Image: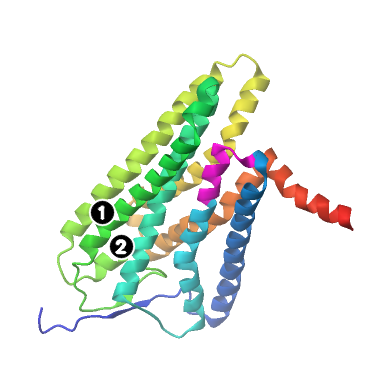
């Protein structure tokens, strides 16, 4: 090991080697990134500006939008830069830092979604005690807990990743630094890292999923006991946006981690990464704004004021 050269930089792979395709992909992902930034910032500003949206559901939506901005900003700017340079390099420490932020934000987001599911449970299953159940203090604790769980998830994997030694090759077969890609390049034994990664994914991922699933089991049970069809429709409509967002997250994760080894490929892994790191952050504000009457009303107020001034 002492005679081997220590790798200090990694080379990130481009999505395409065709120059014309690179220009097209750069333009497309730049547009998507601007949509992510613009739409999520608009959602955050509207929630802060409109007093009618000062409720627990929109408190969580505000933090979800903030997470989506941070989440996409960890990978997309680097990926865009990769299209403009001949060889995109990143230091080992920079790569591990990107990996840490990526895992942190993923962990925080899935627990924010669990908190939103609990909020819908409290609103539908126990509406008389909703104000007490989802008080400001409880909401802050749930958000703080989501960030703490994400931090612990990231810290656990990063501490063991720092012990890895890289001596070549130094080309990451991906457009960003993800832990599985780093493990493939390590010169040292990665069994411990693989066990820690698998264990943490099972513990953190399953706990978040079970919290969300349990909430929706109670929600569906309550909705089905509502006598009128109109009442059932209204109850389901209040959580339909969240169901779609959660479904996108967990379906992507399910297909990524359960796909047979025979269909495992670098291209497929990149497609999954693009979906949950770029497309989902873009779709979240669109889903919540289109499916939510209160958000659409709040978004329409500034437009009506502009028309009045004209």
Q: Residue at x 47, y 84 (%)?
A: 85
Q: Which residue matches tag 2? A: 179
Q: Nearer the viewer, residue 220 or 159?
A: 159
Which of the pair 233/109 is nearer the observer? 109
Q: Nearer the viewer, residue 146 or 103?
A: 146
**Callout 2 crowding tier (Cα within 10 Å): few <14, some 14–19, many ≥20:** many
Circle 2: element type: helix
Which residue is at the front of the view, 82 or 302? 302
Query: Image quadrant for the N terminus?
Result: bottom left
- Residue wearing tag 1: 197
Image coordinates of residue 169 in percent, x first then y, are: 26, 78
Marks 1/2: CA distance?
Answer: 9 Å
Q: Tag 1, which secondary structure?
A: helix
**Residue 115 image point, x, y percent:** 45, 39
Q: Please identify the quarter of the rendering in which residue 185 is found.
A: bottom left
Quadrant of the rendered structure where residue 124 is?
top right
Residue drawn at the location 67% of the way across and 39% of the way down: 52
Mark closest to the chain's N terminus, 1 or 2:
2
Circle 1 packing at 10 Å, graded few (<14), some (14-19), many (20+), is many
Q: Is residue 246 visible?
A: yes
Q: Is residue 229 left or right of residue 127?
A: right
Residue 71 position within the rendered picture, expressed as x and y whole percent measured from the top left: 46, 59
- What span is in magenta? 53-64
- Is 245 included in the stretch rendered in magenta? no
Q: How many badges with numbers are in the image?
A: 2
Q: Are marks 1 and 2 in contact (CB under 8 Å)?
A: yes
């Amino acid at each position: 090991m002492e005679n081997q050269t220590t790798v200090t930089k990694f080379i990130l792979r481009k999505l395409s080697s065709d120059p014309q395709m690179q220009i097209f992909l750069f333009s497309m992902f730049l547009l998507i990134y601007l949509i992510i930034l613009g739409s999520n910032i608009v959602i955050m500003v509207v929630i802060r500006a409109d007093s009618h949206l000062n409720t627990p559901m929109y408190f969580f939506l505000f933090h979800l939008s903030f997470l989506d901005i941070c989440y996409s900003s960890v990978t997309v700017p680097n990926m865009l830069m990769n299209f403009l340079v001949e060889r995109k390099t990143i230091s080992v420490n920079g790569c591990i830092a990107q990996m840490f932020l990526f895992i942190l934000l993923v962990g925080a987001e899935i627990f924010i979604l669990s908190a939103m599911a609990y909020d819908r449970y409290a609103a539908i299953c126990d509406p008389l005690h909703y104000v007490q159940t989802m008080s400001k203090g409880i909401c802050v604790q749930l958000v703080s807990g989501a960030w703490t769980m994400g931090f612990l998830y990231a810290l656990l994997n990063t501490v063991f990743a720092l012990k890895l030694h890289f001596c070549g090759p130094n080309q990451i077969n991906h457009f960003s630094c993800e832990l599985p890609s780093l493990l493939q390049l390590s010169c040292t034994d990665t069994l411990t890292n693989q066990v820690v990664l698998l264990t943490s994914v099972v513990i953190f991922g399953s706990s978040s999923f079970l919290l969300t699933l349990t909430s929706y089991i109670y929600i569906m049970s309550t909705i089905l006991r509502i006598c009128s069809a109109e009442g059932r429709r209204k109850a389901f409509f209040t959580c339909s946006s969240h169901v779609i967002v959660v479904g996108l997250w967990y379906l992507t994760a399910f297909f990524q981690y359960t796909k047979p080894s025979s269909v495992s490929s670098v291209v497929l892994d990149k497609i999954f990464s693009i979906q949950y790191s770029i497309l989902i952050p873009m779709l979240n504000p669109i889903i919540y704004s289109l499916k939510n009457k209160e958000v659409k009303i709040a978004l329409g107020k500034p437009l009506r004021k502009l028309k009045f001034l004209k």
